[in-house]
Image (cartoon, coloured by chain):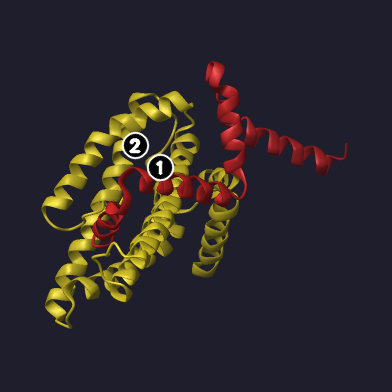
Amino acid sequence: MLVVDAVAFGRTVAGLIIRPYETYRRIIKHGKVGELVFIAAAMVLYFSLASLVKVASFRPFLLTQQFTLLLWASVSGALLSVGCIYVTSRLLRARTTFATVLIAWSYTLIPTILWFLTTSLLYVILPPPRTTSALGITFSLLFLIFSATLLWWKITLCYLTLRFSLKLNLAKSVLVAVLCAPVLAWWAVNMYRWGVFKVPFL
Amino acid sequence: MSDATYQKFVKRWEEVTDIPPQALGPFTGIYKQITKRLKVMPWPWFVAASIGFVLALYVLIGSTITILTSLLQGGF
């Protein structure tokens, strides 16, 4: 069972890179909650690494505390996003289920995990601050291009989530995004204030 | 048309008509042009848009982009 889900997950991730549109159509039609185990595993892997980088010492209590904090904060963000999209879609009378939105939204976390993972590794290899030397500016340009590329991918996947899971037109999809934005902004501000995520993990 | 081909056609037709087509008035053409490029292998467009965006940002704020990078690097 796990092997079947693993193959399905691998196919889906490859599809999201090469053919995001068709892949989202398939996710909505045939996606299973079991596939989310692999996204959760990727998150656990990342948060383990991030805890080590943030705590910067091998203290089991502090590492566990940091890991738990990051994990629950990210789960709360994901559930808030899905819940917000689902409630808004019900207000707009879209035909969908919570599980469908959950599966579709969870796949949008792949660019997020990838960005956070790369950023934390770069933090170890080339710690900030960046200088205004030629090398510093070149690195900054490359890092920003990489970040923006993943952001476009993320935006595309978010749009496809709204388009396919809610079956709404562009105007209504934008309306859902606009209605959800203040709630997610409130979450992001609180995460920043509490020092959990400076860049929202959404 | 053989049964298998017909069934394949019907399945594909049902998939395509499952969601309503986008109609944005005068902007429908632009929307279709953009989404056409994003449906299969969108990475060249993502990278091109990112390069354009970052270079424009560099022209606009100059070496201050290093501060932005430092903030983002510590943002995980």
Q: Kindly identify the residue that appears in the image at 53 percent across and 45 percent down.
A: A24
Q: Is residue A7 visible?
A: yes
Lower position in the chain sequence, tag 1 or tag 2: 2
Residue lying furthest bottom: A58
Which residue position holds label 2?
Answer: A85
**Residue beneath the point at 30% across and 68% down:** A120
Image coordinates for residue B70, horizontal then vertical, percent? 26, 60
Q: Chain of mark 2?
A: A
Query: Is A174 on the left-hand or right-hand side of A182?
Result: right
Numbered disc 1: secondary structure: helix
Vertical placement of residue A105 versus A17, above or below: above
Expressed as whole percent of the image width and height from the top left, the position of residue A15 reads: 58, 54
Chain for colour yellow: A
Query: Residue A126 vs residue A16: left or right?
Result: left
Image label count: 2
Horizontally, residue A186 falls left or right of residue B48, namely left
Residue linked to disc 1: A101
Residue type at the position of mark 2: Ile
- Amino acid type at image mark 1: Val
Q: Is residue B57 above or below residue A163?
A: below
Quarter where residue A116 is shown: bottom left
Would residue B28 appear left or right of A177 to someone viewing this image? right
Above or below residue B56? Residue A199 is below
> What chain is colored red?
B
Labels 1 & 2 near each other (Cβ < 8 A): yes
Which chain contains the residue that carries disc 1? A
Is residue A107 visible in this depiction of the protein? no
Confirm whether circles 1 and 2 share one chain: yes
Task: Report the disc number at residue A176.
Answer: none
Q: What element does badge 2 sit on?
A: helix
Q: Quadrant of the N terminus of chain B?
A: top right
